[in-house]
Image: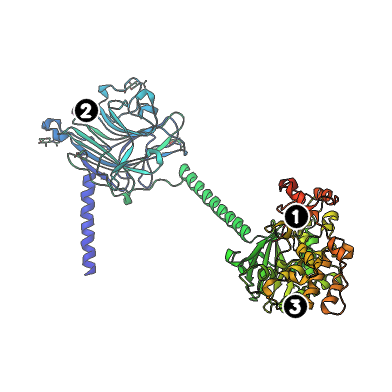
Amino acid sequence: MAAAFTWFHLWLFSCLAVVSMAKAQDPDHFIFNNGFRNANLKLDGNAKIHSNGLLQLTNTSILLTGHAFYPSPTNFNTSSGSARSLSFSTNFVVAIVPESEEASGHGVAFVISKSSDFSHASPIEYLGLANESTNGNSLNQFFAVEFDTILSIDMNDLDDNHVGIDLNGVKSYRQVTAEYYFNEERKNIRLNLKSGDSIQVWIVYDGQQQLLNVTLAPENSPKPDQPLLSTSIDLSDILMDTMYVGFSAATGSIESCSHYILGWSFNRGGEAQSLEMSKLPKLPKNDGRRNMVRMISIIAAVLLLLIIIGAAYVYWREKYGELHEDWEKEFGPHRFSYRTLYIATKGFKDKQLLGSGGFGKVYKGTLPCTKEQIAVKKVSHESGQGMREFVSEIVSMGRLRHKNLVRLLGYCRRKKQLLLVYDHMENGSLDKFLFSVEKPTLTWFQRFQIIKGVASALLYLHEEGEQVVLHRDIKASNVLLDSDLNGRLGDFGLARVYDRGGDPQTTRLVGTLGYLDPELTRTGKATKTADMFSFGAFLLEVACGRKPFDPEKPSREIFLVDIVKRCWTRSAIIDAIDPRLQGNYVAEETEKVLKLGLLCSNPNPDLRPTIKEVVQYLEGNASLPDIPLDTAQNIPFSILETLSQSTEINISTANNLASDPVIPFPSLAGQGLSQNSFSSTNSVLHIGR
Ligand SMILES: *[C@@H]1O[C@H](CO)[C@@H](O)[C@H](O)[C@H]1NC(C)=O
Ligand SMILES: *[C@@H]1O[C@H](CO)[C@@H](O)[C@H](O)[C@H]1NC(C)=O
Ligand SMILES: *[C@@H]1O[C@H](CO)[C@@H](O)[C@H](O)[C@H]1NC(C)=O
Ligand SMILES: *[C@@H]1O[C@H](CO)[C@@H](O)[C@H](O)[C@H]1NC(C)=O
């Protein structure tokens, strides 16, 4: 069965081969779909047939012409008297491949000519069809469709990418810009003749209607429904009984293209057979332009890849990048990677935000490996001198261990950012319990426990460690409460961040108004006694349930210490106690705390108790010294206390003012000291969080 089919097929193929060979010999009907190897074309000039059957009319050298004609002439049978005998149809595939991307020149044409001898024809704008003296002469007797890639003014060319109908000369009878009709979108699309790609061409002449259609399409497109050019033309003066059908091409005088014909079919009197694009010979691959295009696209792809890699790297650095310096190696174990913190805090999402303030934002997080709850504080900083010292201080503080200190687990450094990692305290900061309604009121017992806890933490920092650690920002918002509502002092030493990078002549003042030792503003020097002043303010706020400094209040009540002091002079210090306690307190303890608060608020640093003494009083191991009434009365308004609205002050200004004790608070306030009059870039007074 299979064998029968094979024999049958063989027979069929041989018949077809004979028929097609016979057809190929007929000058009225022929098709070259597999190359021109056996076509026996009449070639001249630069024209040649490649081994794969490709017809090349010219290469890219300048001033070349090349012709290829079907070997025997076509007879348009004028004697038949029928106009129909002049009809013809042809379909071919042409490729114009420029020497380089920009090069051009000059053009190729389909020709039907009385003579096949074009040896006297010129290249360049004559396209190998005529010369200067014969151009347009009716004796030439040719019809051509030119594909011209140069604008020749002399020939009235339209542009440098046009199709023209030529009769006996290259000044076109009709010309149009090369386009093709795109069936799907029903519109014309520009076609670049010298793109180097194959272009399909259909030329149909109806002798009866004297109508010529020229249609173009890119390689692999179906035949367009609309011709590029449809013109009425009478070819009866040109088409005679012996006409040669073929192609002509010419190169330019400066730059050039190679001109190729890949396939060709022709039919006089009927429709030309369609070419099968897949069977056509291939264009040479080692073409300069193509190589260049390939090279450019490879380079572009590599560049694109590099850009993508670069962008990814920049993105990664922006997201996770850190600042590492050699000296940090010794602190390695205390260093967290930014990525860890990023994951722990879910990308520092707002949802994780615990609070924000003067020092920066604090985020809640969970360490990915240990599931430990942490709080990450983001502090902006300029990395520069002193960073090393600061980090070593941070790390040494990380070694401090006390049950009433918030543990500092480590740090991470990024550009302009320092991240400090602390234990997370479940109940947040104490100020929320004292000043806002969202948390329950703390009982006196709880408050007293917290006060004692913070005092013992401060004792540890001041007296019990290997070195003295000054806290410099003691206040309720820096006291955090663990799950059992034990007070833990946080943020110790952090104030030092702001000591760095400023003008050495002026020290940055850090602290919170109302907690800030007036003496500190004069000397600019952090001391234990300054910490005690803040601690005093802290004692008062815990006992009284209001902030030490409240600019919203009437001027007599702006400073908590004034209120307590007035109660004290009335011998009714207990009146200052937080009304929310509703009388549930231990009078002895509250009195002790309030008096200690006043003692610590003494403007004279030397008269303030030390933390050791405070702890002894609180524990009841020593009895409180009497506060002389006049001392209490003499607590003056610190000049700093007048700066109610300002967030930044110039310390030198503050110094001058502070050394002048006669200006009382109300008069200064009356003068309307504005923020501007105290602003300075070097010295910053931070008002709490
Ligand atoms: C073009 O063909 C001519 C003749 O074959 C040859 O001398 C010349 O080197 C060729 N030019 C190029 C660029 O190949
Ligand atoms: C020319 O046309 C006439 C009349 O139609 C016809 O008899 C003759 O065979 C044709 N000659 C050729 C060569 O086709
Ligand atoms: C132009 O071509 C004709 C023949 O077609 C020839 O006799 C003549 O010499 C040519 N002129 C030039 C300038 O080449
Ligand atoms: C030539 O094009 C015109 C316009 O599209 C069309 O009407 C005509 O049928 C075409 N003629 C041939 C022979 O294709």
Q: Is the Cβ of the residue at disc 1 closer than 8 Å to that at disc 3?
A: no
Q: Mark 2 vs mark 3: which is more N-terminal?
A: 2
Mark 1 or 3: in front is 3
Q: Three-letter amino acid code at disc 2? A: Ile
Label 1: which residue?
A: 685
Q: Mark 1 vs mark 2: which is more N-terminal?
A: 2
10 Å crowding of disc 2: few (<14), some (14-19), many (20+): many
Span of residues in magenta = 232-238
Q: Is mark 1 within 8 Å of ligand 1?
A: no
Along the line of sight, the residue nearer the viewer: 108 or 230: 230
Q: Three-letter amino acid code at disc 1? A: Leu
10 Å crowding of disc 1: few (<14), some (14-19), many (20+): many
Quadrant placement of the N terminus? bottom left
Helix, strand or loop at label 2? It is: loop
Label 3: which residue?
A: 449
Q: Is residue 235 magenta?
A: yes
Q: How far across and how far down the image is residue 13, in percent? A: 23, 56
Position above or below: 266 against 524: above
| Residue occupying the point 83% across, 55% down | 524
Q: How far across and how far down the image is residue 97, in percent? A: 41, 40
Along the line of sight, the residue nearer the viewer: 242 or 427: 427
Q: Is the Cβ of the residue at disc 1 closer than 8 Å to that at disc 2?
A: no
The label shown at residue 500 is none
Along the line of sight, the residue nearer the viewer: 272 or 444: 444
Mark 2 or 3: in front is 3
- Colour setup of the view: rainbow
Helix, strand or loop at label 3? It is: helix
Q: How far across and how far down the image is residue 501, in percent? A: 78, 53
Quadrant placement of the C terminus? bottom right
Q: Quadrant of ligand 3?
A: top left
